[in-house]
Image (cartoon, coloured by chain):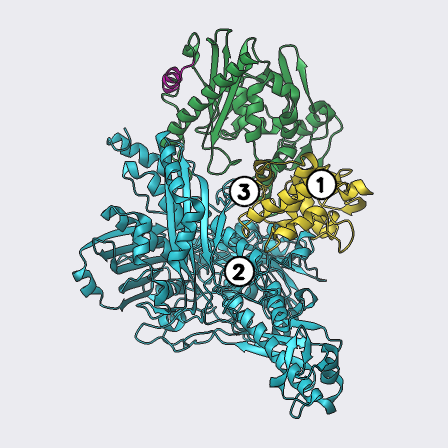
């Protein structure tokens, strides 16, 4: 299981990387390689050139930028997991990251690589979808910005521009108020591609009344989707309210069938996980108020 | 391509095709056969090595990506020829292996964990080795070995790693 | 025999092999470097069955670094077909497909190049023209009249169809108060070692010897290679000092070795094939049994099981090989640990267009145990009886051993009731039941799983003559040699490769025990096959019994020689001497030291007793204990020793997500005298993990187009450290009366009962919904969907 031959380029700058990608339509970005390299090994992907961006300082790091937390594309998942800034300002992403792969894959795998690959079960993509993060590319057209719902089309099919380089993902900072996040997924082994996953974020006011609720579902269909649970606002997020809102929000959810999990299972599991994620988010928000 | 690999404290200049994985370069260019190929697609963890202190799968990196990185393989875990490091000795004490094929990856994963956390819970231990598949042991004696190594490391006043001792 | 007075056996001593492995200094086949070595990659068939019209390797051969391209026609012209276990001469099998391929992924051509990567590049350029043929993957469809035969020359897909009647089956059925029937299916999985199969073959033209280094666990491997390559047996030299990275049965490697052996001779260079994971999963020919059991059971209302009719229908895959014998071994424990008075057993092995089967841990015993234990649970459910009580009621009692079962095997010893009692006490069974009920009250699915079963060990392969009358095998011997050299140091020779079983530790321990010297001072070596005594490799849970017996008896022989020499030196008869820790004491306080005996033996022929050979060395060939007669009238002794295990599990899961969590796993284990506790513990825990995989996760699944859907580790799911719980082992020791130290086998322990216990726990958990899930692996979505469907029909808690 050896990759087909390719040329390797390690550009010194983002501009050089862009130029290399623009010059050859069969080139591919190599960042963490945790998804790409297995595909190369099985010869399912046969790029002519690999452009290694993993050492580009301009693509590394996590920082605040106004009301956003910017995670540069080649930032390791393990770095994001350790980041105090992420934990403080993007709690849903912080809750999602421990579910990404295993320690050795998080040590190399990047935040941008996970998003760019467009796997429907990617936890980071689900968090980005729920929170309305923006996905930023540099391409021939200059800087391009995508909302998740305009970016993730189908399994590993995205709106990424030809020859483009994902530079960063910008997550909105947590809203004001008591904020809680919950992330749940199920797979037959912990760390595997999930059969269903759910990410939720809620905001409570001082009385414990919900002012905002967000929910997204991943893994079940072609792409992660944000679903509407705004009707929870104004209530106290009781179990009954959550169940009712989830049932309504997930009506008509597209689910796929495969060897390991049926579509009917994924649909019910998504609902159960969504309820659990919302309850976890609620409890976290309540706890935040208590401190 | 000419690449400089710093492995177990020693730098080697090797000539590799870009497609050669770090795993193959360690084995075939550096003669370090302790790192094993299990699946070559990033699932089994038999090829785990430390790169800049983090456990990673050497089948998912190309050697050309690694120049100037600090790589540690299982061969770098023994303080002297014929003398075992504390983690290795703990694996022997609890018989945390059988056929020995996944063992180097397990020892490396344990090392990466214990460098950061010398009081791991059983969950921490299992998470640290969750990307390493063992078909012989059912993991029980591996978990015992890492527990024992953690205890010994906490109780000893020796340096954590052979590199640190140098 | 008792454990009293033993110094090293049963002591918690380290396993000597571990040192080299934790340092990364094992010696696996892929670690070996040879000058001029060439590398093989395979060209795989795409369709499940297709006629090979042409294979054109010219473009591949023209690539730089490519040495050779060969196809099945060339190979078949030069080598004999590989051996079949059954008498099925028209089911021919070669390392590369000849004329047509019979499963997707089957190797149809081999490319040899200067590196593996170049060989893979070239394999893509081999032009293969084929015409698709009909195919069948479902075993019952394969049996239908008019089904496409996988081997047209054989005439049908049936390899084996034998019905055995042991005891008065019809009478017992007529007399029984009740009966029921069930069908359970064991899915296709395997042991999937982390090291794939690998082999290096090197032809030494000036010596006329083929040197082979391979990751094998294969009885009579060298013989089969020689036979296939049409060279003398003493022209194949297998190097046993190769560490094997796991096997658990499957690493037989005949086709790979014949291919490389042929290429090595043709090319005059060492040729290496290290299967990559895709080659290994699709065409390493190492899948395990895939079996449908149809059972009818006759019982009384008090729970006494009187008789059983079992039909085992096995999907053997595309070729016969040794796999059909996996229907034979379970005959040795066909009634499990129960006093079932009569049995009808129909064994059917059927070819389909799937990957070929190989021996898997337990050789068919684990699937059979799953069927028997599910049957016991179903009878208990039918009668409203407690599942443990029904087992107790049917267990063979301690005083009944040796106990001959209807199919002719004699169980050597056991104390099943006591093991169960110890497990229930250790687990606090009542508290476990209370915990299950508490979890259920929380709205979770919670269940207790139970399995009791046997591990037949130390066999003589009697299923071969039983299923193939031309085969007269009645021994499955093992040899060992003990030398004391001129400096007085001890070396033991063992004659096999090992794949994690700790044979060096085993041999050193028993020889140290006999000679009363520290095993750490004993060297253990593995001569190559031409320098070896006959042996049969570590299969069938036999090495503690057979290698342990051989090494101990060789050591006893050496000790006897030492006593004779000392007697001569002291002028007394050997019977008057006392051997203690290497020193020999006479009746009057005089003594002779180890070194003095060694000096006489090695240098002073004059002082040796008359008729004694110089040097201190002894070889011993261990015959299988027990009854060596060939089976008669479909009946005979299969295995001499029977270990017992009792599994008790508490499992819990959410009824919607259905992700099973094993909260408690307790196993009672009785394998007689334990030689090394660390090793036995490891085997048991590893076997349970493997059983968890078989029950819940692992399957070589095919789609309707005959393609294997689970050919990488992304889809073939093996348990990780998160899926295998902490397991508690409760020990018991009922020594075997047949073996040197009372030891029995344990190499298959855990695996033999875990799938049954896990299936039982899931069934207990879904009992309120009245659901049966009778096919392994039991996937989460299957459980959840079944619960949801039952609830739609108004079943369940609500």
Mark nearer the N terminus (3 vs 2): 2
Q: Is residue C718 magenta?
A: no
Quarter of the image for residue C345 reads bottom left
Q: CA distance from mark 3 to mark 2?
A: 24 Å
| Place of residue A11 in the rendered image (x, y in percent of width and height, measured from the top left) | 74, 30
Pointer 1 with pointer 3, Cβ within 8 A: no
Tag 3, which secondary structure?
loop
Q: CA distance from mark 2 to mark 1?
A: 43 Å
> For chain B, what colour was chosen?
yellow
Q: Which is nearer the eye, A142 or C348? A: C348
Residue receiving disc 1: B155
Decide if residue C703 is in sight here: no
Pointer 3 with pointer 2, Cβ within 8 A: no
Q: Which is nearer the eye, C563 or A58? A: C563
Chain to which the residue tagged by mark 1 belongs = B
Q: Which residues are magenta?
A: A237-248
Q: Residues within 10 Å of mark 1 (few under 14, many from 20)?
A: few
At horizontal 72% and vertical 80% (from top left) the residue drawn is C598
Residue receiving disc 3: C721
Q: Are both tags, 1 and 3, on one chain?
A: no
Decide if residue A148 is in sight here: yes
| Place of residue C284 in the rendered image (x, y in percent of width and height, measured from the top left) | 51, 56
Check the image and report above or below for B12 versus C144. Answer: above
Q: Are both tags, 3 and 2, on one chain?
A: yes
Q: CA distance from mark 1 to mark 3?
A: 26 Å
Quarter of the image for residue A14 reads top right
| Place of residue C53 in the rendered image (x, y in percent of width and height, measured from the top left) | 45, 58
> For chain A, what colour was chosen?
green
Residue extending furthest right?
B166
Check the image and report above or below for C776 versus C545. Answer: above
């Amino acid at each position: 299981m050896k990759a087909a031959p390719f040329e390797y380029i390690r550009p010194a700058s983002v501009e050089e990387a862009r130029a290399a990608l623009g010059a050859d339509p069969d080139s591919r970005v190599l960042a963490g390689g945790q998804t790409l390299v297995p595909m190369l090994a099985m010869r399912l992907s046969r790029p002519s050139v690999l452009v290694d961006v993993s050492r580009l300082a301009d693509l590394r790091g996590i920082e605040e930028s106004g009301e956003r937390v910017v995670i540069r594309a080649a930032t390791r998942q393990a770095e994001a997991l350790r980041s105090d800034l992420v934990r403080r300002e993007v709690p849903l992403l912080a809750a999602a990251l421990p579910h990404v792969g295993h320690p050795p894959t998080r040590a190399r795998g990047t935040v941008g690589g996970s998003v760019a690959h467009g796997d429907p079960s990617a936890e980071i993509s689900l968090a980005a979808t729920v929170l309305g993060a923006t996905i930023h590319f540099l391409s021939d057209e200059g800087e391009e910005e995508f909302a998740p719902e305009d970016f993730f089309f189908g399994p590993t099919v995205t709106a990424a521009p030809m020859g483009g380089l994902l530079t960063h993902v910008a997550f909105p900072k947590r809203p004001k108020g008591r904020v809680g996040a919950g992330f749940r997924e199920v797979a037959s082994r912990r760390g595997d591609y999930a059969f269903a996953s759910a990410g939720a974020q809620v905001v409570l006011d001082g009385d414990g009344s919900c002012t905002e609720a967000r929910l997204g579902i991943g893994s079940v269909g072609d792409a992660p989707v944000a679903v509407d649970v705004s009707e929870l606002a104004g209530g106290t997020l009781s179990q009954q309210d959550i169940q009712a809102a989830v049932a309504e929000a997930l009506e008509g959810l597209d689910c796929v069938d495969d060897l390991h999990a049926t579509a009917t299972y994924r649909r019910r599991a998504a609902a159960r996980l969504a309820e659990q994620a919302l309850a976890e988010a609620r409890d976290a928000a309540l706890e935040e108020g208590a401190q | 391509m000419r690449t400089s690999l710093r492995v177990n404290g020693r730098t080697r200049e090797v000539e590799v095709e870009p497609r050669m994985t770090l795993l193959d370069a360690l084995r075939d260019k550096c003669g370090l056969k302790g790192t094993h190929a299990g699946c070559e697609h990033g699932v089994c963890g038999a090829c785990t090595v430390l790169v800049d202190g983090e456990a990673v799968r050497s089948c998912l990196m190309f050697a050309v990506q690694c120049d100037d990185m600090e790589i540690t393989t299982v061969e770098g875990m023994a303080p002297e020829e014929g003398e075992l490091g504390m983690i290795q000795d703990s694996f022997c004490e609890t018989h945390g292996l059988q056929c020995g094929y996944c063992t180097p990856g397990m020892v490396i994963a344990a090392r990466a964990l214990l460098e950061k956390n010398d009081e791991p819970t059983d969950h921490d231990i299992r998470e640290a080795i969750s990307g390493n598949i063992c078909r012989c042991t059912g993991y029980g004696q591996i978990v015992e070995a890492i527990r024992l190594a953690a205890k010994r490391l906490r109780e000893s006043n020796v340096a954590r790693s052979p590199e640190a001792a140098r | 025999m008792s454990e009293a007075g033993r110094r090293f056996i049963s002591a918690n001593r380290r396993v000597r092999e571990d040192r080299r492995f934790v340092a990364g200094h094992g010696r696996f086949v892929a670690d070996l470097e040879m000058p001029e070595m060439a590398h093989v990659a395979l060209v795989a068939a795409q369709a499940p069955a297709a006629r090979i019209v042409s294979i054109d390797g010219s473009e591949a051969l023209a690539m730089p670094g490519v040495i050779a391209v060969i196809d099945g026609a060339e190979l078949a012209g030069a080598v004999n077909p590989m051996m079949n276990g059954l008498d099925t001469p028209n089911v021919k099998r070669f390392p590369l497909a000849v004329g047509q391929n019979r499963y997707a992924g089957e190797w149809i051509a081999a490319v040899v190049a200067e590196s593996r990567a170049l060989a893979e590049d070239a394999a893509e350029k081999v032009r293969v023209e084929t015409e698709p043929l009909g195919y069948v993957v479902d075993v019952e469809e394969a049996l239908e009249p008019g089904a496409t035969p996988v081997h047209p020359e054989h005439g049908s897909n049936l390899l084996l169809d034998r019905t055995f009647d042991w005891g008065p089956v019809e009478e017992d059925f007529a007399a029984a108060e009740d009966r029921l029937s069930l069908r359970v299916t064991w899915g296709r999985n395997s042991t999937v070692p982390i090291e794939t199969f690998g082999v290096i073959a090197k032809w030494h033209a000036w010596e006329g010897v083929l040197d082979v280094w391979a990751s094998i666990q294969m009885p009579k491997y060298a013989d089969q290679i020689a036979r296939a390559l049409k060279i003398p047996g003493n022209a194949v030299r297998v190097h046993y000092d190769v560490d094997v990275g796991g096997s658990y049965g499957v690493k037989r490697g005949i086709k790979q070795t014949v291919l490389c052996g042929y290429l090595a001779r043709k090319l005059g260079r060492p040729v290496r094939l290290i299967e990559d994971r895709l080659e290994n999963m699709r065409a390493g020919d190492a899948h395990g049994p895939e079996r449908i059991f149809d059972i009818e059971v006759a019982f009384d209302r008090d729970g006494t099981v009187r008789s059983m009719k079992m039909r085992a229908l096995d999907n053997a895959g595309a070729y016969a090989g040794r796999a059909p014998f996996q229907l034979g071994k379970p005959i040795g424990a066909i009634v499990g640990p129960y006093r079932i008075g009569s049995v009808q057993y129909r064994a059917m092995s059927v070819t389909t267009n799937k990957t070929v089967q190989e021996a898997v841990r337990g050789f068919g015993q684990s699937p059979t145990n799953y069927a028997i234990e599910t049957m016991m649970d179903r009878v208990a459910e039918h009668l409203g009886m407690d599942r443990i009580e029904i087992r107790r009621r049917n267990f063979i009692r301690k005083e009944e051993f040796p106990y001959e079962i209807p199919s002719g095997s004699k169980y050597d010893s056991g104390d099943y009731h006591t093991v169960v009692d110890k497990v229930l006490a250790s687990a606090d069974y009542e508290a476990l039941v209370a915990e299950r009920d508490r979890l259920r009250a929380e709205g979770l699915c919670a269940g207790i799983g139970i399995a009791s079963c046997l591990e037949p060990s130390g066999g003589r392969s009697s299923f071969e003559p039983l299923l193939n009358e031309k085969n007269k095998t009645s021994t499955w011997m093992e040899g060992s040699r003990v030398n004391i050299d001129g400096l007085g140091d001890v070396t033991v020779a063992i004659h096999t490769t090992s794949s994690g079983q700790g044979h060096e530790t085993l041999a050193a321990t028993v020889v140290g025990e006999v000679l009363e010297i520290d095993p750490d001072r004993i060297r253990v070596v593995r001569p190559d096959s031409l320098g070896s005594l006959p042996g049969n490799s570590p299969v069938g849970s036999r090495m503690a019994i057979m290698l342990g017996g051989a090494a101990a008896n060789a050591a006893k022989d050496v000790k006897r020689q030492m006593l004779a020499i000392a007697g001569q030196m002291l002028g007394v008869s050997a019977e008057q001497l006392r051997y203690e820790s290497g020193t020999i004491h006479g009746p009057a306080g005089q003594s002779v030291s180890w070194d003095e005996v060694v000096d006489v033996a090695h240098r002073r022929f004059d002082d040796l007793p008359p008729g004694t050979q110089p040097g201190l060395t002894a070889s011993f060939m261990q015959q299988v204990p027990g009854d060596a007669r060939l089976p008669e009238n479909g009946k005979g002794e299969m295995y001499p020793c029977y270990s017992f295990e009792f599994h008790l599990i508490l499992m819990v899961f959410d009824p919607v997500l259905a992700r099973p969590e094993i909260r408690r796993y307790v196993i009672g284990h009785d394998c007689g005298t334990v030689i090394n506790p660390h090793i036995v513990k490891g085997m048991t825990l590893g076997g349970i993990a493997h059983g968890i995989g078989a029950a819940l996760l692992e399957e070589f699944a095919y789609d309707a187009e005959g393609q294997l859907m689970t050919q990488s580790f992304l889809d073939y799911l093996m348990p990780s450290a998160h899926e295998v719980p902490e397991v508690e082992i409760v020990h018991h020791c009922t020594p075997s009366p047949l073996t040197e130290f009372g030891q029995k086998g344990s190499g298959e322990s855990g695996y033999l009962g875990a799938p049954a216990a896990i299936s039982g726990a899931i069934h207990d958990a879904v009992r309120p919904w009245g659901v049966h899930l009778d096919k392994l692996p039991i996937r989460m979505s299957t459980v959840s969907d079944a619960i949801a469907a039952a609830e739609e029909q108004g079943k369940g808690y609500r």
